[in-house]
Amino acid sequence: MQQLIMRAVAVLYVVSIIAVNCRLNKNDYLVCMFIVFVLLSARCVSQAASKAEPAVEENEAVNPTFVNRNPRNLEQMSLAVKDRGWKTIWPHKEFYHRLVFSRTQHHVTAEVFSSSSLDPVLTCSTKEWALKRELPSTNCVAACQAVGEVLAQRCKQAGITRMVYRAIPWSYRSDAVQSFRKSMKDRGIILSEPRRKYIGT
Amino acid sequence: LAPGPLPNQDIDVKNLESLEKYHSYKRYFRQAQEAHNKPVWWHTYRKYVEKANPQVDIGFPLEQPNRTKQVKERKQVMKENKKNMELERAARLWEQTSGPHHIRRLAEHYGIYKDLFPNAFFLPIIPLKVHYGQNSSVHYGNILTPTEAETAPQISFEAEEGTLWTLLLTEHLLDGEAEYVHWMGNIPAGAVQSGDELCHYLPPFPPRGTGFHRYIFVLFKQNGPIDFRDNARPSPHSLEERTFKTVEWYKKHQEHMTPAGLAFFQSQWDASVTHTFHHTLMKEPVFEFIRPPVYHPPQVKFPHRQPLRYLDRYRDGQPHTYGIY
């Protein structure tokens, strides 16, 4: 600030000398003063900026490479690798998440598996007391529909909305499987997976 | 000479007619799945991939009532249900019965225990409800936008009178470092606003190109009032001061705190993230996905049935002449 004041005084002195020698009229003199003021203020600003830079640089120390540790991130960006090559057998393993629906004599179970885990990620079955209490019968079509609705809600809350569902061909046409599928789709779960993004896609 | 029994060793191949038949696809499929998951003595890819280290439970133990009594009561309720065929559906019991186990399974799937506490897990027995406004709420893996998460959320959980809680919001970023975005200590039962706010709420800022980040709410139950003064940060502070490691912080206060609740959501880049960067932190970084290099098997002196561009694949530094082949 002191330097600035010294400089301002020096410049004003020079300008005053010029004004006196060149006999500038009043308007020219004002214009000169204005230009000087602008230059000085610009100088001020640049000096202020240079002082504040160290604080900004602390925050800007960004690592050029960033590793996202979310194991689900690549799947959701459809960049993760799908297990290709099982085309000669059934069922195939080219998915990120798969849906399994099974009916036993007394209960109905629906599970969501991921490609890398043996244990299911999400389950919904009539064996759970929460569902068993509300249903009159645990192996009918209404039970399948209930299981579908509850599982769809849990999937949406968990962020898994796209999965692959290949039903056993001869049971696909039954009312139970159709009602389960319909309830899942009505609640917003999409039963197909996005195609993987290769180079150039 | 094999070190164990070979599969299908005990089946008499010469007398196949005498074998027991499955008679249905379902029975075969169930047995095939059990056989697939059984541990075996020969080398498999599953064994080759490193299994998780032995896990320790650091949460509260689950309180289970007497099982026989429970089963009797439930059977009675089922009988009454059968008489009454029209029933409405409500799944609020889930939170008390199988909710914690499901949330724990999902947290393992999202790698949350691995990142926050290595070699430890906990059962989130207390349901934690976090709401950003009326429409969006945080469950276990929800996808929310940073615009929805700009203001601090309303948090509610069931608590008895006189208990003290700590709430922590982290976003685990780099190897071994978490970044905490909002943190409150010594919360009396139920009223989150009256706790000491040790860190200002900073809205989530996933940089563009990095994909989905997880933001984790952890609720700890305190045995008594804890002094968090060495962890308190003043209101305007830079990113560096916000970094901390959950493991070390938890080890310091281990005896006075137990984790009891868990909720997490995911979010991606949004226009409001630029706003957050420019106003609070720094210039906005933009990232691009780096694909892993294409794998080629070790080079062989006489490659059988390979085209001439086989040599292109192993010439150092040169770009391939025909795509990835």
Image (cartoon, rainbow, N blue to C red):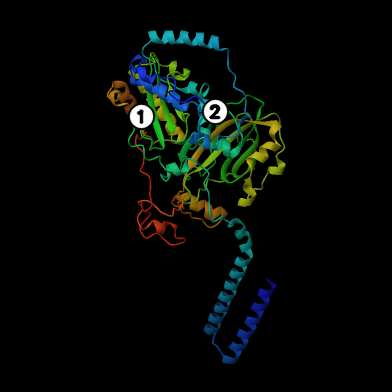
Q: Which residue is mark 1?
A: A184
Amino acid type at image mark 2: Pro
Amino acid type at image mark 1: Met
Q: Name above or below for residue A36 compared with residue B90.
A: below
Q: Position of residue A66 (x, y in %)?
A: 53, 51
Q: Position of residue B208 (x, y in %)?
A: 47, 51
Horizontal arrangement in the rendering, residue B69 relative to residue A122 (left or right)? right
Distance between mark 2 and mark 1 Cα atoms: 25 Å
Q: Nearer the viewer, residue B100 or B234?
A: B100
Q: Name above or below for residue B195 compared with residue B23.
A: below
Can residue B248 be seen at all in this image of the molecule?
Answer: yes
Q: Name above or below for residue B153 compared with residue B89.
A: below
Crowding near the residue tagged with mark 2, few <14, some 14–19, many ≥20 C-alpha atoms within 10 Å: many
Q: Are marks 2 and 1 in contact (CB under 8 Å)?
A: no
Res B161 → quadrant: top right
Crowding near the residue tagged with mark 1, few <14, some 14–19, many ≥20 C-alpha atoms within 10 Å: many
Disc 1: host chain = A
Q: Position of residue A36 (x, y in %)?
A: 57, 78
- Label 2, secondary structure: give it: loop
Q: Name above or below for residue A1 compared with residue A154.
A: below
Disc marking residue B170: none
What residue is at 68 percent from the left and 44 percent from the top? B232
Disc 2: host chain = B
Disc marking residue B127: 2
What residue is at 47 percent from the left and 33 percent from the top? A117
Res A107 → quadrant: top left
Q: Nearer the viewer, residue B170 or B295?
A: B295
